[in-house]
Image (cartoon, coloured by chain):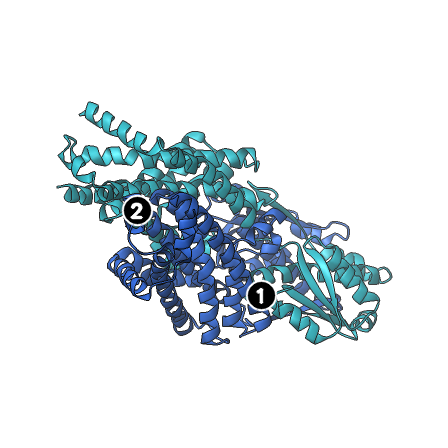
Chain colours: A blue, B cyan
Amino acid sequence: MNARLKALTMPLSWKRLRALVIKESLQVVRDPSTLLIAFVLPPILLFLFANAVSLDVRDVRFGLVTEDSGGAAAELAAAFSGTPYFRISHARDRRELEDAVTTGRLKGFAVIPQDFNSRLLEPAGAPSLQVITDGSEPNTATFVAGYAQGVVANWVRGSAGAQTSMAGVSIEQRFWFNPELESRQVLLPGVVAIIMTLIGTMLTALVVAREWDRGTMEAMLSTPAGILELLLSKLVPYFVLSMLATLGCAAMMVALYGMPFRGSIPALMLVSAVFMIPALGQGLLISTVARNQYAASQVAMFAGFMPAMLLSGFLYEIDTMPLWLQWLTQLVPARPFVEAIQTVFLAGDLWPQLLGNLLNMLGIGALFFGLTLSKTHKRLD
Amino acid sequence: MWFRLRAAIIKELLCYFRDPSTRRFLSVVPIFQTMIFAFAASMDVQNIDIAVLDEDVGRWSHEMVARVDGAWFSDEILPVHNREQLHALIEQRRVILGLHIGQDFSRRIAAGEPAQVQVIVDGRRANGGQIAVSYLQQVAAEISADLVSTAAMTPESAPIASAMTPRVNLRHWFNTNLDFRQFMVVNLTATMAMMMCLMVTGLSLARERETGTFDQLLVSPLTPIEIIISKMFPGLLAGFVVSLLVLLIAITVFNAPFNGSVFALLLGLLVFVLSVVGFGLLISAFSQTQQQAVLGTFFSTIPFIITSGFMTPYENMPQWLQTIAVINPLKHYLMVVQGCIFRGQSLLQVLDNIWPLAVIGVVTFSLAVVVVRRKLA
């Protein structure tokens, strides 16, 4: 135990470290799969998040059953046809459309009933119309219901004209940092977090686990190199790789996707560099615990990639999650990183907030490294 | 041949499922992932703190703040005294949005004039922010409606206005309360099966190659086709087990319905898993090491998930991307799952989404056979 502690605190030999770093870097550069993750995946991910991930519903296929014709019913039907959000399929009989909803071809339909016009003329008879949505996709269903109700409300306002007064409370919304409300401006910084998690956590976990898998870890340990030198030499190439990937992502985001960059490049680099501490630490910890590549890849996916995607706050609001999950997000290094990097891109170098994020990441990093060191001791004795 | 094939399949299955950590991954990890996904991936916005700058301090601004405070989506109201404080809270991400009620708010309402509340939203959280604003608009609409109804007590125009307004009877089929968690876990039965199945199959040949047992495989009496078939089984089984496990969770824990045909779902699952296995074998054939196989799996899983309609509706994608995404097996299988579990489709209707899967499966499989045979030769 004492000997190992000594080995850990042994002064670093720069010459040995340099040699080891060169060896590890060559291994990285020669493996096409690493380069695939660092330089080919980022443009693809950016492209997909910029184009495929969208909450803007438009052109929804919606059905309209007009059992009544002429007069107000026809006006209302015209109002439905006129909205840009719906692509309307007309029908006389609702049974024609029920099947289409079941097969998923229509996202819902509205029925203007037979007695619509006659009831509208009676003072006491409020006419009703039915709106059915396909609830198996709740997001779309919510939008469809909202739009359908909006069409009716607009039509009422239009035909009621002067009768409806303008009084009442309205909301004037103003979006800071992102006035055009482009969701890609929120999502793309999150892509950087995913890429860096993949490189820092996933790749590192795999590489160290591979040494154990193949039995070359023992060989490395019997060389004069100390543990610290070995670990550092494993981490340095991935650190450099992920910084390059970050710069590449930032350049593409600004040049290709019109992302604003209101902060400074030093701030971006600082935030990314500090994020690598917990990311690499988590990778090391995973490889130390898992010790074979299959297990390491599964744990890295489960504990590294998924939280970076789901619990970092760039896709889903953390406030909305149940409390136990909110606590769990405190352990996800991608969470402060996403907050920091969104701020650097969209708002600028807001140091009071960035400093908090940096401390947060350092704390998580210290936890991961501490756990790794304690585990490493036991294994080596 | 059957004897050899049987022996090879048994060997492959033992290889994977004898290892206790692998068995754990197949059971524990999907359960955890399902729970986290179901609770994290929500499109609602709840429990948010809201900053309020009330310059009016009148009857109606109190009413507005009280209603926001009492609304289901808000947690805490943070009163501020000037614009700087409001800005600081938003800048530091303490709140997602702030209300600014101007001095003349109550006066204008009392006078029957339109009154405005300014809402300042953190654009860094634009998605959640937009949803929160729509909730605030509902609150404003409720106040307006109350104003109209109290104002309409005297004039005789009120009954006419109410008669003019058609009542909208809204019904959500298949998931009456629009329970987003149900939607999520049901879709996870497909997504998790794909991830697990791809990972297991992707590693199959790569692991043999890395540990040096690939050559032993070559000198064994097994024919290439037999090797391929035996390598399919662990992935096939993993996909099936995980999918059914998540389905069990969906039905027991999240009360998901099962409106359609069980047979159709199982048939769809089989065809889906086969098409994914074919793809996994392709990845494995091209990987020299396990690391490459894992990264290759990742590299293909992410685009499949994003373009499948799992995270955001498929129809929201631009048309050209929808056209390309037709080759995505996950997209078709999600339709099968939703069709069987929610929409209560008949077998014939489900088959509409199964045949594209079969086509994809035939293509990936023949490619895999061609490539693996070449690598084995």
Label 2's element? helix
Label 1's element? helix
Along the line of sight, the residue nearer the viewer: B260 or A27: A27
Rendered-image quadrant of the C terminus of chain B: top left
Q: Are marks 2 and 1 on the same chain?
A: yes
User: To which quarter of the image does residue B9 belong?
Assistant: top left
- Residue located beneath label 1 in the image: A356
The disc placed on residue B116 is none
Q: CA distance from mark 2 to mark 1?
A: 40 Å
Chain hosting mark 2:
A
What's the amino acid at mark 1? Gly
* In the displayed structure image, the side of residue A353 where residue A4 appears, left or right: left
- Residue located beneath label 2 in the image: A218
What's the amino acid at mark 2? Glu
Where residue B103 appears, as percent x and y from the top left, is 78, 75
Chain hosting mark 1:
A
User: To which quarter of the image does residue B173 belong?
Assistant: top right
Q: Earlier in the sequence, mark 2 or mark 1?
A: 2
Q: Which residue is found at the position 73% from the left and 75% from the top?
A: B82
Q: Nearer the viewer, mark 2 or mark 1?
A: 2
* Neighbourhood count class around disc 2 (C-alpha, 10 Å): few under 14, some 14–19, many 20 upward: few
